Image: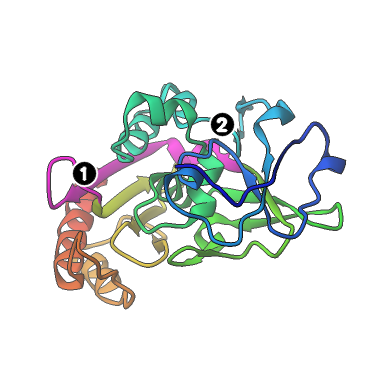
Amino acid sequence: MDLIDVREVRVAHSRADMVLRPGERAMGGGTWLYSEPQPGLTGILDLTSMGWEPVTRTSETITVAATCTIETLRALPEPLFEQCADSLLASWKIQRTATVGGNIALALPAGPMTSLASALDGIAVIWTADGGERRVPVTEFVTGVVTTVLAPGEILRAIEIPAASLHRTAFRRIARSPMGRTGTLVIGRMDTSGETVITVTGGTTRPRQLRFDAAPGAEDVASAVDAIDDWYDDPHGAPDWRRAMSMLFAEQIRQELS
């Protein structure tokens, strides 16, 4: 779609270029930005020219740049990356262009990069408008449907994922049609300490993380899922269906990780 009100596209080469002007928005891949009208948008700041390394790995942390494409993330060896990337249900052309940071910053309930990062205790690295930096857990970064903690002028720089969070994982997802938008997506993991974490996304307005110090029982998991009170309601799934499927998947994951 043509964005007929856009008067200027700036290409960022340094942090000094990343001061957003009135009516301007930062862009990663642009796959959503160009998909529908953007009222009030008069300028675009292209972040892809910053040259950020897509993925940097150490023994303790996996740092994913906001401009890392979903295709690049999908190629990482751990199965959960591919599972979440394919939950976008986009063609290879979109996966090659769409970015991890863009998917998270858009904050749609069905955003699979939000599901991935929140399930793995990812930390959002945010560049602030005054030249500083702050860090926020991805579970807190997304605050609702298309709302985040980003203040005016702030830019999502990267996602930091603890390598230990990938020790053991389990994945469940459902949609109302074979190629439909996510109805609910549940990811579980068990760390080396024995802590079990089950994260529900897709069917809720924001990521909901359920934490257990040790392997939980069936009643513990059911009670935790039942306490979720912000089930999303749209044509892709009613709240009661999303709740029921999340309850089922959480129990399946509990058994798989036990």
Q: Position of residue 243 (x, y in %)?
A: 20, 68
Q: Quadrant of residue 158?
A: top right
User: Can you tell which of label 1 and label 2 is closer to the viewer?
Assistant: 2
Give 64 or 180, whichever is nearer the viewer: 180
Q: Position of residue 96 (x, y in %)?
A: 45, 25
Q: What colouring does the structure picture have?
A: rainbow
Give the residue at mark 2: 68
Which mark is first along the chain, 2 or 1?
2
Secondary structure under tag 2 reads: loop
Give 51 or 60, whichever is nearer the viewer: 51
- Numbered range of the magenta stretch: 159-181
Amino acid carrying mark 1 in the image: Glu
Identified at 75% across, 60% down, the residue is: 22
Q: Image check: 182 left or right of 77?
A: left
* Mark 1 neighbour class, 10 Å CA radius: few under 14, some 14 to 19, many 20 or more: some
Disc 1 to disc 2, how far (Cα)? Answer: 31 Å
**Which circle marks residue 256 in the picture?**
1
